[in-house]
Image (spheres, helix red, strand yellow):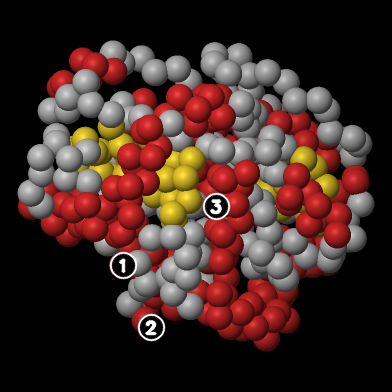
Amino acid sequence: MTTVDLIYFNAGGGHRSSALALQAVLREQGRPWDVRLVNLFEVLDPTGRFQRITGKAPEDWYNQRLARGWTLGMAQELKLLQSLIRVAHPALLRRLRRHWQTTRPDLVVSLIPNFNRALCESLDAALPGVPYVTVLTDLADFPPHFWIERHPLQHLVCGTPRAVEQARAQGHDAQHVHATSGMVLRPEFYRPGTVNRADEQRRLGLDPGRPTGLVLFGGHGSKAMLGIAERLIDTQLILVCGHNTKLADALRALPQVAPRLVVGFSTDIPRYMQLADFLIGKPGPGSVSEAVQQQLPVIVVNNAWTMPQERYNAQWIEENRVGLVLRSFRSIDRGVAQLLGDLDAYRASVRQVNNRALYEIPEILAGLLQGGTPERPAVSISDQRRPAQLA
């Protein structure tokens, strides 16, 4: 059986989510492939030595910073990380070469940044001829050496015209640059809602007659949600805190005028999006893509605290008129009023977006396994509604 490895790690959550989404759709389509999820950090540190020494997994440091809002200066820290990866490159090659020789995949798909040079070079050294694919889970690259490398064997799956332009500018030819119509989303975001919105809102203590904002900052929440809730005391909100139980407790303790629902970790984000009218969050490619897929306009910020790889996302939001970009959440009350005042126009823009990446990528991978040009994407039998596109 053909073996396909999906490479991910847990920093931020979006890379693992994309890997799980691809695995799910490949199984749904019944392809004769053994699809394996491979956590890169478990390959590089199989005995957990880093966690034993520091008390935390490598991803935990990053995720805790996101939860606390400590994102200022991340551009400089990214440069430091990339320097360390370059220094460790020979050791990474040795470790990864041994891994490929042992596991022997037929296709490797990376859904992570920063490590693609080491992954691609080691695979070529261990198993010449095995295709190596990088699926960008950001709307654009943050060069140099973030997603796109100059390695001639790296195939790149790009979800926006901007990312395609960046790949071609790095010297990759048309046979190695594969355009899709957006980001990878879980299959659940393509399925129609099955609940009665008004009844479900009433069941959760919300008022069906009020506009509802969904506040979402990834799987670990953000302290910024406290300020947002305080400034939107008259706005009905659903606040998703993820694994951050302290944040959830603090939000429940805040005074409120409009109804408010505080949610902990949930795998049913599509349902909460179907109960909302707009999204408030950071300009992450995953949450923005999911909101647009569910036809929700978005409100995000773009400032010195915005992670460097996410700044283009704010530009994309403005160019496509699918939401508002603020300088700070201190003006979130005015932002919500502006969005609601022109909600129909923003909804019309959101409906113009048509993301089919989840169903396009399997055809790209099939074409590479066959050694030819990828096939035209097929329609999934489970795709029962017109999806949204990030391109």
Q: Nearer the viewer, mark 2 or mark 1?
A: 1
- Residue 81 seen in the current view: no
Please provide percent x and percent y for residue 341: 38, 32
Q: Secondary structure at mark 3?
A: helix
Q: Residue 53 shows which numbered tag?
A: 2
Give x and y (percent) for residue 335: 37, 46
Q: Is residue 371 above or below residue 139?
A: above
| Residue 203 in view here | yes
Nearer to the camera, 268 or 66: 66
Residue under the image location 22 percent in, 46 percent down: 232
Q: Are the residues flagged by discs 2 and 1 in contact, CB closer than 8 Å? A: no
> Is the residue 229 above or below the residue 344 in the image?
below
Q: Which residue is mark 1?
A: 68
The secondary element bearing badge 1 is classed as helix
Quarter containing the C terminus: top right
Task: Relative to 182, say whether 134 is above or below.
Answer: below
Q: Is residue 378 left or right of residue 198?
A: right
* Residue 387 in which image quadrant: top right
Q: Residue 314 — which label?
A: 3
